[in-house]
Image (cartoon, helix red, strand yellow):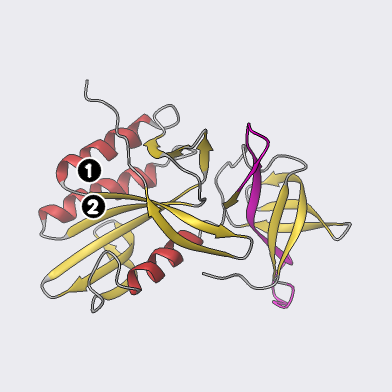
Amino acid sequence: MIYQNVCKGIFIKRPNRFIAHVLIHDKEEICHVKNTGRCKELLVPGCTVYLEDCRLHTNRKTGYDVIAVEKKLPDGKSLLINMDSQAPNKVVYEWIQKGNLFPSNANLKTEVTYHNSRFDLFASYNNTKAFIEIKGVTLEENGIVRFPDAPTQRGVKHIYELIDSIKEGYHAYLFFVIQMQRAVSLEPNIATHPEFAEALCASAKAGVKLLAYTCNVSTNSMTIDAPVPIKLPAKK
């Protein structure tokens, strides 16, 4: 996926989940944050962020969207992380359309309702039907990425609904999109939400296919790159 009219800014503060104050061209602007997660380790005062200029959309209250951030690493280098929560669904859709995961003749639909959940993608081909739930990952420490960065009861509900779908003959996938290039492995964030980790383990046992892929991230684009292993907690 590609963004249009991208510019650079310096992050100042984030008074609530939806907006950030960013210095752009020496002027403080109020910008929309396209990620309602905490992102405290990313949006650090003084960090470099990248924004999509949306000022041509006259009905908007904010003129820019925050789409990516440079995270300083312990070795002094920077890691570019896409933090647009809408991007993972788009890049997975594009990736599957190119013949990945399913045959090229697979029919794809977005936002498909199943029982009490609405899954991100639904694929059908021949006699196969599959639900795909997609989770964006931005929390990284020394190459290990974790999900979630905040408790998500909605995420837990989705997992158990995926398990139920398998019992009814569907295939089920949980796809973690790591919105950066550097990652050694993905782990459930037990300290933040142990219930999600339990559900993830239950899903693997039930036959939900767990996938985690890094992304090629630039200041104005993101595409699926390479798989990384998912490390589940050891059984007690």
Residue 161: within the magenta?
no
The picture quadrant where one finds residue 103 is bottom left
Amino acid type, residue under disc 1 in the picture: Ser
Residue receiving disc 2: 162
N-term mark: 1 or 2: 2
On residue 45, the disc is: none
Gap in angstroms between the C-alphas marked 1 and 2: 8 Å
Asked whether, in this view, residue 3 is left or right of residue 179, the answer is right
Range covered by the magenta-colored residues: 55-79
Which of the two residues, 236 or 19, is positioned nearer the viewer here? 236
Q: Considering the numbered disc 1 on the image, is that residue within a helix, a strand or a loop?
A: helix
Asked whether, in this view, residue 40 is left or right of residue 196, the answer is right
Label 1 Cα neighbours within 10 Å, binned few <14 / some 14-19 / many ≥20: many
Residue 73: within the magenta?
yes
Q: Residue at x 56, y 50 (%)?
A: 36
Amino acid type, residue under disc 2 in the picture: Leu
Please provide percent x and percent y for residue 62: 73, 64
Please provide percent x and percent y for residue 145: 46, 39
Tag 1 and tag 2, C-beta contact below 8 Å? yes
Q: Work out whether 97 lies above or below 39.
A: below
Given the current orientation, which residue lies at the most extreme right position? 26
Which of the two residues, 14 or 6, is positioned nearer the viewer here? 6
Given the current orientation, which residue lies at the most extreme top position? 236
Q: Residue at x 22, y 43 (%)?
A: 203
Please provide percent x and percent y for residue 212: 36, 49
Q: Residue at x 86, y 61 (%)?
A: 25
Residue receiving disc 1: 203
Q: Considering the numbered disc 2 on the image, is that residue within a helix, a strand or a loop?
A: helix
